[in-house]
Amino acid sequence: MSEPIHRQLGMTDGEYDAVVGILEREPRPAELAMYSVMWSEHCSYKSSRAWLGRFPTEAPWVVVGPGENAGVVDLGDGWLAAFRIESHNHPSFVEPYQGAATGVGGILRDIFTMGARPIAVWDPIRFGSLDDPKNRYLFSGVVSGIAGYGNAVGVPTLGGEVEFDDVYAKNPLVNVMALGLLRREQLVLSAASGVGNIAVLLGAATGRDGIGGASILASASFDEASAEKRPSVQVGDPFEEKKLIEACLELYDRGLVVGIQDLGAAGISCATSESAANGGMGMDVDLDRVHVREADMTPGEILMSESQERMLAIVTPEDLDVVLALAAKWEIDASAIGTVTAGPQLKVMHRGELVAELPAASLSDDAPLYHRPVAVPEYIETAWATEVELDLRDVPNVLLQLLDDPAIGDASWIYEQYDHQLFLNTVIGPGHDGSLLRIKGTDKGLAVSTDGNGRRCYLEPRAGSARLVYEAALNVAVTGAKPLAMVDNLNFGNPEKPGVMWQFTESVEGMSEACEALGIPVVGGNVSFYNETDGVDIFPTPVVGLLGLADPMPQSPPRLDRAEDGMDLWLVGDDERDGDLAGSAVARVLGAPHVGRPASPDPAAARSAVETALALAHVAPVLHDVGRGGLAVAVAEICIRSGVGCDLMEREASSWFEESPHRLLVATAKEDGPPAASAKRIGTFTGTNIDFGTHGSVSVADAASTWRQAIPRRLH
Amino acid sequence: MRTAVVVFPGTNCERDVVYALGVLGARADLVWHRETDLSSFAGVILPGGFAHGDYLRTGAIARFSPVMDSVKAMADAGQPVLGICNGFQVLCEAGLLPGALVANRDLSFICRPVHLRVESTDSILTRSATVGDVLEIPLNSYEGNFVVPEADREALHTVLRYSDAQGGVDDDANPNGSFHNIAGVANRRGNVAGVMPHPERAVEDLLGSTDGRILLESYLASLAPIHV
């Protein structure tokens, strides 16, 4: 006997009973399909919602917090920024090019839905080792997909971050963050209002692609049969999206929309129900009016299709003709598919037949909420009781091994495939700690950093996650930008396992504590559970996306390539802490057992480091966060980029590779003296070698060629 | 004297070109590709992007856009017509410039600054520069590899070639496999020019280079009918 339909759609028996309770009858097929997707983990956050309230979300500059398509913050002088982060993990594993491409397309719609012009994208991505051809295929496919879509849609990609670890081999992580800029009066929200107003579907024709993407791909674990899910991956068309962006921005400029919603997961059913529910209204929808690619699509297919590049605008009947004419000018299709009603029902007709009638709000508001069991996983006790043991005495050799690591080596193979300069805003582009964009016509700059560290979070989810926030804060501060607001993408394993839920709750707590310590509100986020393949969960991998505001922006912000012969090199931050090698890059690269307990952050030290960086960003030629690979890698990055050597003062070999938090490197002209009261001089830039004194030395040329080849040599 | 900056569906560098010309004190207006009358403009720029999605082949559909008749008329009248990146591809497809641009040698998109050596100053793109000047300008393309049939090579009017920082032109300095390292060409008369890298991305120190100014200034200095 075959499975009941609701189970095939990924619903539990209890969830099915809840639907029957709401409708007071058995659901029609189209209704069941709608509930199954809207109540999926991906759309409803049913396992995570109970915990997400922990995040601090308020600040005077927050205009729109979590819950809308994107968070919006006030930049002053009438400027707002809209930003969001999303994941496209499972689709990218099934079909890397289209999975990554549609991830970019989807997040851009979230931004221009708010009334903002998307101005930049970042892509934090994670794969298994490049030694495996499958991983090389996934990695290069994802990068091509991001480039192919992002370049053609005309939004620059400013970087992101990359990690390689075999825990991601069967479950790569493809996250994408987008930023948009708008004037305050351009802000648009999704709510439908006004009985009799018209719902206009704009953009691509609705086809059979991507049906069930959210429930089937994004909300279930993976196994051998997953390749058969390829038809659930959507196919993107950046040209259609580009026209849609321009058409929507002109609609807003001319005041022609009452509300607007993008079509993502669950397509028309989600967009119509959310618009209606957000406005406290209902909607009558006629599926015969939808422009479709194939004539014989079933109502369920039309409702659930995740065809890309579509928007649902609510307009007044008087403006309808103007809206349709404007769509025609931009050469996009448009159909009036529905009418706003007093509610609360969403009624869907197809060929004269009622195919769905349900309370619009029930799809979102009545979604299940689970308090899943939480328990400390077994590995923690052993890991914390074990010390990391590494032989780091050959400092130059260990440094070269680190520079040869594709996660630390030169990332230009990736970012030179991305247009990262369009719109003429890119002051600091990829390859630095944080990106910096100017806002033309103002003295302001916007900085962004995306940061994740799965290995550290696995060993210490709370401290590891908190440290991501602090690291991102330092990365934006070194460009002169004050941390303003954050979004997060919480990539975790199977939430039905108590150990995974423990990782999740600890991570939320750690990030929240760090946000509170720095006064950073969380204005949006995404939870990606079920990153599990063949029973193996990924490392808990929260990724933070932090936005900072520089006002005024430094006229000559610090860069890694501005060190010169004769300058002094200073370390700012606590240099006396015990070694922090647990979860470090050097432990990974040298193949040490994955054990130990990473250091906890120090909120006071973190604040002090951010303040110091903010002050120095206006005067120091080089300001660099000490991150992956510790001091040795941070120094080498400056030497390689600046083309100058460095005579370093003696210190214990292991301290070159420890990753203690809240530390900065500063280069200054000799006559300028210490850049901060707490600064400690650790070297002088000179010659052509990175010289570790009694530990030996390595030439900048050798370091540079190793660093440059780290990714290319593994691909060709 | 105003410049028309043509916007095809999928064009994306139009605002950057208008902005850069503005930095140089000049005025430019966006013109939708369905416009057929450019008589109020002294010159026209086809900017970068993905006109008509680059579907079929770069520029293959754009050459049929209604605006192209007026662009051709301006070219015939000796007025300045400049194509940047995708605009260069469109001018080649439209037969206003020789050759074509095909996929890069390494089959991957390239976004990075490159060096260009000025080869000829008899064009609206280079008239204010000096032969031998080396300029650092961002390249941003997938189909940037210039090819030209044997028959057109003798009459080819090369204005810019990819070089190293010292002006040396060799294979190592060729980012995309272009024939003879060619980055920019003009018609014989010099009033129609195409360039693969983006001069509008190099007009401010804040963004890394101001070497694009001399090229855009050349264009602006040409905004009266020229007789090279």
Image (spheres, coloured by chain):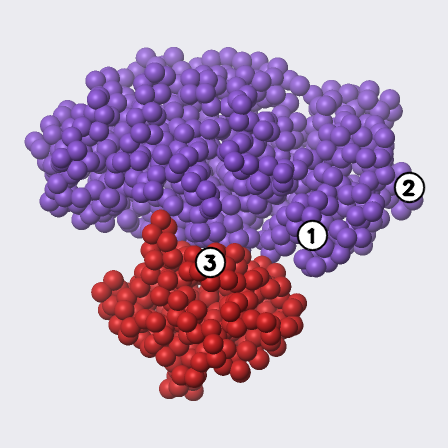
Chain colours: A purple, B red
Which mark's residue is nearer the viewer, 1 or 2? Answer: 1
Label 1 amino acid? Ala
Alpha carbons under labels 3 and 2: distance apart: 58 Å
| Amino acid found under the numbered disc labelled 3 | Gly
Give the x, y percent position of residue A148. Answer: 51, 54
- In the rendering, which numbered label is found on residue B22? 3
Residue lying at 81% horizontally and 45% vertically, measured from the top left: A337
Query: Compared with residue A500, is residue A673 higher up or lower down, i.e. above or below?
Result: below
Label 2: chain letter: A
Residue contact at pointers 1 and 2, CB within 8 angstroms = no
Q: In this picture, is A500 found above or below A332?
A: above
Quote the CA–CA distance across marks 1 and 3.
Answer: 36 Å
Q: Residues within 10 Å of mark 1 (few under 14, many from 20)?
A: many
Protein chain holding label 1: A
Q: Which mark is residue A204?
A: 1
How many residues crowd around disc 2 within 10 Å: few (fewer than 14), some, or many (20 or more)? few
Q: Identify the amino acid type marked 2.
A: Glu
